[in-house]
Amino acid sequence: MKEFDSKNLLEDQLAADIISVIKSAIHQYGDARILLSGGSTPIGLYAKLAASIIDWEKVIIGLVDERFVPLNHPSNNEKMIRTQLGDKTGATIISMVPDSSNRINNLSLVEENYAPFKERIDFCLLGMGEDGHTASLFPTDSNSEANLQSDFIGFVNTQAPVEPTNRISCSKALLLKSTHLAVMLIGENKLTVFNQAKEAKFPISYFTSKLVVYYAEK
């Protein structure tokens, strides 16, 4: 766990760490492949990444998970990432809901479109809810629970306990393929949940073996 005196300092260090991974991957492979989370917590981080001078045209960004809503929906994770990062850098962003009208068809499209990430994930940023969920793998959802117990590398449709309930998520095994795996935790409540995760068998606990935690109280 890396602890910081403020969220701003956390963002500075995490942005620097991500940029280092991106540059290394581009040097080694010719491109960098990263998975990012939505929500409000990483908005400042993405702004700092967008201000970094790197070869963004060689960066491929995918989503850890997505709400099953159109791109123009206010809850759409891709919309936030495009606004804060993609539109400002020219990085390639691959949609996780290319077909918001059909969940089954969408799942097959994602399997095809996210093939680069099944080959290699250089960096993945997770988030965590106060129920201990991560990505869109929830403690109360049967598809999520089944996936957490499996070694399936791919994508899964899940149900969230709050709207929008229909979600799609990278599988546990796919996320664990990431060379670098991190989570941002802000606030004592989140830290308490994280510390209880293993005993309570929250979804986030399935990732702690290789997870780097970036924490700030506020």
Image (spheres, rainbow, N blue to C red):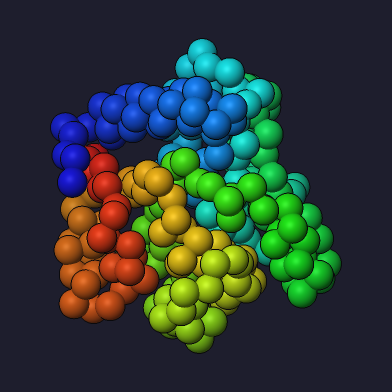
Give the residue at the far front of this rendering. Answer: 28
In front: 157, or 38?
157
Name the residue: 77% across, 61% down: 109
Question: Quick one: quadrant of the C terminus?
Answer: top left
In percent of width and height, residue 209 lies at 26, 60
In percent of width and height, residue 60 lies at 62, 36
Give the side of residue 174 with respect to residue 12, left or right.
Answer: right
Name the residue: 43% across, 50% down: 178
In percent of width and height, residue 120 lies at 53, 47
Give the side of residue 77 with respect to residue 137, left or right.
Answer: right
In front: 7, or 26?
26
Residue 86 lies, with reference to residue 170, above or below; the image says above
In percent of width and height, residue 12 lies at 32, 25
Name the residue: 36% across, 71% down: 203
Give the side of residue 6 with respect to residue 202, left or right.
Answer: left
Name the residue: 51% across, 13% down: 53
